[in-house]
Amino acid sequence: MSAEHLFEDVDTYINSLFVQADPVLERAIERASKAGLPDIQVSPGQGKLIYLLAKMIGARRVLEVGTLGGYSTVWLGRAIPEGGELITIELDPAHAAVARETLKDAGLADRCEVVEGKGLDEMRALEPSFDFVFLDANKDGYPAYLKQAIRLLRPGGLIVADNVVREGAVLKPSNVDPNAIGAAAFNQALAGHPELEAIVLQQVGIKGHDGLAIARVKD
Ligand code: SAH
Ligand code: DHB
Ligand code: MG
């Protein structure tokens, strides 16, 4: 068996052990697929991970940049308590419309707001303080999103960013892929930032080879 297949099989094994079958999440995938959205949402295991991280810090105010059909939004929305608030920013109105349906279906419409617009513009318009920021939109925007995330987060708040390894494309110095350049610049800024403590988790599995960055704002 090739390493790639083995990684996928182990990912599927982990997901089947640790992520319950869930009609709301299944319908979210189906709704997004029917609407022609790309199949690039986080994996079930990644969803569970961001859910757990948000819960572990007792997050009440969560910001997501890059909603797609709201799959990751459901995970994050479920992590916050009643009275909590999640804002998710999405550039594409068709994606935002699917996400709103999915959030209604999940019973989370009262605490999750889908804001249509550019990630950076919408972040600039927000006021502190948030507990948790999940970055998952255009990767060339990540360095600018990072500055805004730090402005918006409380001490002890978390930043999680998807797709920061890109099959190792972040290693290549002369890269013409703006997403890889953005992710590499983001990683560097994260690593050197005096207000943050951070790490990147390299991941392999059903979403291929990529990585999640996790950073905590110092007290
Ligand atoms: N977080 C989602 C996946 C997001 S995919 C999940 O795991 O379920 C990336 C999304 O970012 C796409 O829907 C895309 O339309 C959106 N996007 C791209 N550029 C953007 C920008 N400048 N501002 C906000 N959203 C953007
Ligand atoms: C892709 C994957 C992602 O997780 C994402 O947020 C954006 C794009 C991709 O594979 O193209
Ligand atoms: Mg992603």
Image: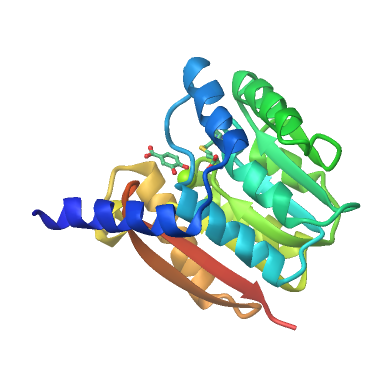
Quadrant in the rendering for residue 154: bottom right
Q: Nearer the viewer, residue 183 or 29?
A: 29
In the image, taking residue 11 as reference, residue 55 lies left or right, namely: right
How far across and how far down the image is residue 209, in percent?
29, 54
Residue closest to the far bottom: 219
Q: Nearer the viewer, residue 144 or 34?
A: 34
Residue beneath the point at 66% across and 42% down? 74
Residue beneath the point at 63% across and 74% down? 216
Q: Nearer the viewer, residue 203 or 181?
A: 203
Say whether residue 177 is visible: yes
Specify the quarter for ligand 2.
top left
Residue beneath the point at 68% across and 63% down? 54
Say whether residue 63 is visible: no
Quadrant in the rendering for residue 88: top right
Quadrant in the rendering for residue 195: bottom right
Identify whether 166 is placed above or below 190: above
How far across and how far down the image is residue 96, in percent?
66, 26
